[in-house]
Amino acid sequence: DQQVKQNSPSLSVQEGRISILNCDYTNSMFDYFLWYKKYPAEGPTFLISISSIKDKNEDGRFTVFLNKSAKHLSLHIVPSQPGDSAVYFCAASASNTGKLIFGQGTTLQVKP
Amino acid sequence: NAGVTQTPKFRVLKTGQSMTLLCAQDMNHEYMYWYRQDPGMGLRLIHYSVGEGTTAKGEVPDGYNVSRLKKQNFLLGLESAAPSQTSVYFCASSPEGYEQYFGPGTRLTVT
């Protein structure tokens, strides 16, 4: 049972345009959500997070939106840059469990 | 400050052999984790630890054992390797169990 799902395995956008990566979850106990970025042959690195008490969190070109009623979150990257080309994982946590559940990942390609 | 390091980076095993993967962190984090990454499967949690001397099972613990004798180290053991354990293994640490810091990974092939 996949509790965190990223239904788009890949996404291709033009440099300068907006990239929107989506993530759905099923467990209503999740209260903290994170996005990680992963380059080939490297470990994932933390990108941005959001608590369930918020519906939006922004950090520079990256914004995460949370829709609790739909159990859906999205990551917006604007403007997209070629260096953003990577695999993006969303992850979710229920408080006090100390662990994250990851989605399958979406490969983003930003074309110059 | 090296962050999270993993040893070895690559390893090839034959079916039935055993090995230990070492993870070390120098950030004084309480939480440590072992994941495996397979194509199309994302990162799946094998075992984790919420402090020195503690371990707990994750989503896919079968065939693996772990130990956390020292706060800075988290060892992952394969007692009898199987081809299904061919994967990339990532270790991570976290101060509070939310934001996690990952190592560079170990690529393991079992033939």
Image (cartoon, grey):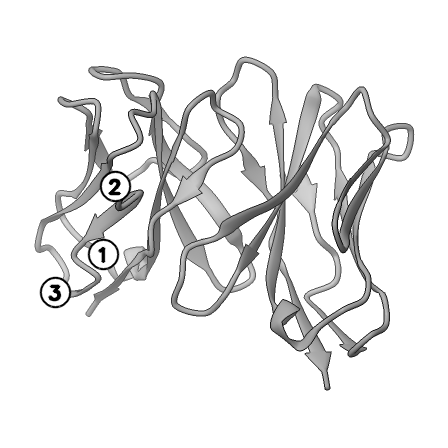
As drawn, the label of residue B63 is 2
Task: Give the crowd class for mark 3: few <14, some 14-19, many >=20 residues within 10 Å.
Answer: few
Mark 3 — on which chain does it sit? B
Q: Nearer the viewer, residue A14 or B53?
A: A14
SS label for mark 3:
loop
Seen from this angle, which residue lies furthest right? A69
Q: What residue does disc 1 label?
A: B82
Mark 2 — on which chain does it sit? B
Q: Position of residue B52 (x, y in %)?
A: 23, 17
- Do residues under tags 1 and 2 come within 8 Å of each other at their CB atoms? yes
Distance of mark 3 from mark 1, alpha carbons?
8 Å
Kind of residue sitting beneath label 2:
Gly
Q: Earlier in the sequence, mark 3 or mark 2?
A: 3
As drawn, the label of residue A7 is none
Q: Position of residue B28 (x, y in %)?
A: 29, 25
Q: Position of residue B36 (x, y in %)?
A: 39, 50
Task: Give the crowd class for mark 1: few <14, some 14-19, many >=20 residues within 10 Å.
Answer: some
Distance of mark 3 from mark 2, alpha carbons?
15 Å
Q: Nearer the viewer, residue B14 or B67?
A: B67
Q: What residue does disc 3 label?
A: B14
Left or right placement of residue A110 versus residue B102 in this view: right
SS label for mark 2:
loop
